[in-house]
Every structure is written in structure tokens, then in C-alpha cells.
Image: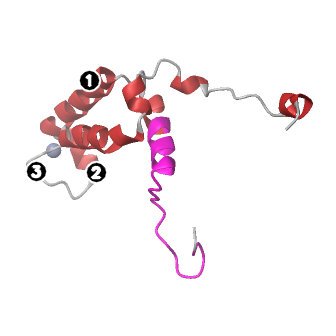
Amino acid sequence: MTKEEAAKLPKYTPNPIFAGLPKILKDPGSYYKVQKALIETLACPTTHSDPAEMQKCSTCTENMVARRKLMHRLGFSSLHQYMEWRKVMELMLGISKKKPIHGINKGD
Ligand SMILES: [Zn+2]
């Protein structure tokens, strides 16, 4: 590649949503640890068949607050940043939440 060709390549611009994200969270190896820690904050002894019940449950409400606090301690600046981080990590790790539909997204 010549210098001129190289200059024509699109410049790498990091997504501003990830500005200030701690280095540890940029490591895909931390994905499962982070997810495990966050999921553990949501443990409730009552099983709720309807997700709407969770909003009325005091344990679940406290758990949501604990989850938010842990998210901030881990270094996420917002829920939006966390959601975007999850998307990127799942893409990097090849985790697909799409359920395969026979014959439609085969070989996804
Ligand atoms: Zn609950």
C-alpha cells in the first residue's frame, strides 16, 4: 500500500459512547464476570410469573437499585453505555441471542 492509498482509508473514530470506559471493561475476558456479578444482584426468593410483579416486589426494587450501583462501581457511566457495551462484547464473543429459525437465518 502506498502512502497515498493509506491516506484514503477511513479514519478510525472511537464511538463516543465508550469514552471513559475503564480498560478492564474493554477486555472481552471480563464480559462473563461482569454479567455474572450483575445477574447475581437480581436474585429474588420469590419467583415472579409476570414481570410486572417485580415492580411491586420490595426485594426486586432494592435489587434494581443495587444493580444500578454496581454498574456505576464497575465503571459504566449510564445504562445506555452498558447496553452498548453488551452488544459489542456479544458480537466479539460470538454470542447470538437470535434463535435459529429453520431455513431462515441458517449459517448466521
Ligand atoms: Zn421479587
Label of residue 69 in the image:
1
Q: Quadrant of residue 42?
A: top left
Whether residue 22 is situated above or below residue 57 in the rendered picture: above
Residue lying at the far top in this picture: please name it. 20
Q: Are marks 2 and 1 in contact (CB under 8 Å)?
A: no
Mark 2 vs mark 3, CA separation in Å: 12 Å
Residue at 28%, 48% in the rendered image: 52
Q: Is mark 3 within 8 Å of ligand 1?
A: yes
The crowd level at tag 2 (other Cα within 10 Å; few <14, some 14-19, many 20+) is few
- Queried whether the magenta region covers residue 100, the answer comes back as yes
Looking at the rendered structure, the secondary structure element under dot 1 is helix
Q: Which residue is mark 2?
A: 51
Quadrant where the N terminus is found in the figure: top right
Task: State which tag comes first along the sequence, 3 or 1.
Answer: 3
| Tag 1: amino acid | Lys
| Tag 3: amino acid | Thr
The crowd level at tag 1 (other Cα within 10 Å; few <14, some 14-19, many 20+) is few
Q: Which residue is mark 3?
A: 46
Question: Bounds of the magenta span?
Answer: 84-106
Residue lying at the far right in this picture: please name it. 4
Whether residue 98 is situated above or below residue 13 in the rendered picture: below
| Tag 2: amino acid | Pro
Residue situated in front as seen by the camera: 70 or 89: 89
Q: Are marks 2 and 3 in contact (CB under 8 Å)?
A: no
Q: Is mark 2 within 8 Å of ligand 1?
A: no
